[in-house]
């Protein structure tokens, strides 16, 4: 039997990401706010590139790094942290691997250079049409890096072709990202999750 503490009054769910080398050097990657369904299933994350505050997780990073090195692990580590209404932090999961939202963190310099301070990663975009038609229809958004496709898979169901996309939507504000998602939803019949 496994027993774990029940965390009440959760106000935020983070994924803190870093790299630890064989010699114990730590390179911070970033922190995202995770998006989950009401059942707790991961569906993406958001990031404010100028508001990343890694210092509050420093003790956790040090402890996890030390454990990783004891196990002879080196590489990317992402750990999930819940924050309650009193500001208490609780580590709930540690992933000794590349995480789904790593690309969101790694686009920081590219997007900031374009004046885009906020970004959202989602694994749940479903667009009607072939991948080829979507690339044509979204050329402006792709060229402007409003949308960055990380992976795409074209499928068909009941003789209807659609494309599932894992991607990043970026903007200068949350509202701009919401507008881009709304535009995609109206023009291409996108099924996605609301930006939180």
Image (spheres, rainbow, N blue to C red):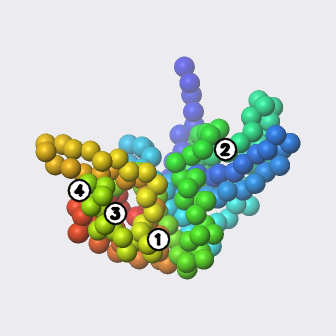
Residues at badges 2 and 3 in contact (C-beta under 8 Å)? Answer: no
Q: How crowded is mark 3: few (under 14 residues within 10 Å), some or many (20 or more)?
A: some
Query: In the image, is 155 to the left or to the right of 106?
Result: left
Mark drawn on residue 145: 1
**Horizontal and vertical percent for residue 154?**
30, 48
Q: Residues within 10 Å of mark 1 (few under 14, many from 20)?
A: some
Q: In which quarter of the image is the C terminus?
A: bottom left
Query: In the image, is 57 to the left or to the right of 172?
Result: right
Mark drawn on residue 77: 2
Earlier-in-chain disc, 4 versus 2: 2
The nearer-to-camera label among 1 and 3 is: 3
Q: What element carries label 4?
A: loop
Mark drawn on residue 135: 3
Q: Is residue 153 visible?
A: yes
Residue 94 sits above or below residue 29 on the image? above
Residue 66 sits above or below residue 111 on the image? above
Earlier-in-chain disc, 3 versus 4: 4
In space, the residues marked 1 and 4 are separated at their CA atoms by 21 Å
In space, the residues marked 3 and 4 are separated at their CA atoms by 10 Å
Q: Nearest the camera: 196 or 17?
A: 17
Q: Nearest the camera: 120 or 150?
A: 150
**Horizontal and vertical percent for residue 180?**
36, 72
Q: Nearest the camera: 65 or 60?
A: 65
The residue lying at 67 percent from left, 45 percent from top is 76
Look at mark 4 in the image and give the residue it sits on. 129
In space, the residues marked 2 and 3 are separated at their CA atoms by 33 Å
Residues at badges 1 and 2 in contact (C-beta under 8 Å)? Answer: no
Find the residue positioned furthest to the top: 1
Q: Quadrant of residue 103?
A: bottom right
The residue lying at 79 percent from left, 51 percent from top is 26
């Amino acid at each position: 039997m496994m027993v774990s503490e029940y965390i009440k009054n959760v106000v935020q769910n983070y994924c803190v990401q870093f790299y630890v080398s064989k010699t114990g050097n730590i390179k911070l990657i970033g922190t995202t706010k995770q998006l989950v369904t009401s059942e707790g299933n991961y569906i993406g994350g958001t990031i404010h590139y100028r508001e990343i505050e890694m210092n509050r997780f420093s003790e956790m990073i040090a402890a996890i790094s030390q454990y990783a090195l004891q196990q002879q692990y080196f590489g990317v580590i992402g750990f999930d942290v819940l924050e309650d209404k009193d500001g208490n932090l609780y580590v709930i999961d540690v992933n000794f691997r590349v995480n789904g939202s790593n690309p969101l963190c790694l686009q920081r310099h590219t997007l900031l250079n374009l004046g885009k301070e906020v970004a959202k990663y989602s694994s749940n975009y479903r667009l009607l049409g072939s991948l080829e038609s979507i690339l044509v229809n979204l050329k402006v958004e792709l060229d402007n890096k409003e949308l960055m496709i990380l992976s795409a898979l074209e499928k068909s169901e009941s003789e209807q072709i659609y494309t599932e996309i894992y991607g990043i939507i970026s903007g200068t504000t949350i509202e701009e990202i919401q507008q881009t998602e709304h535009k995609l939803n109206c023009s291409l019949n996108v099924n996605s999750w609301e930006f939180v």
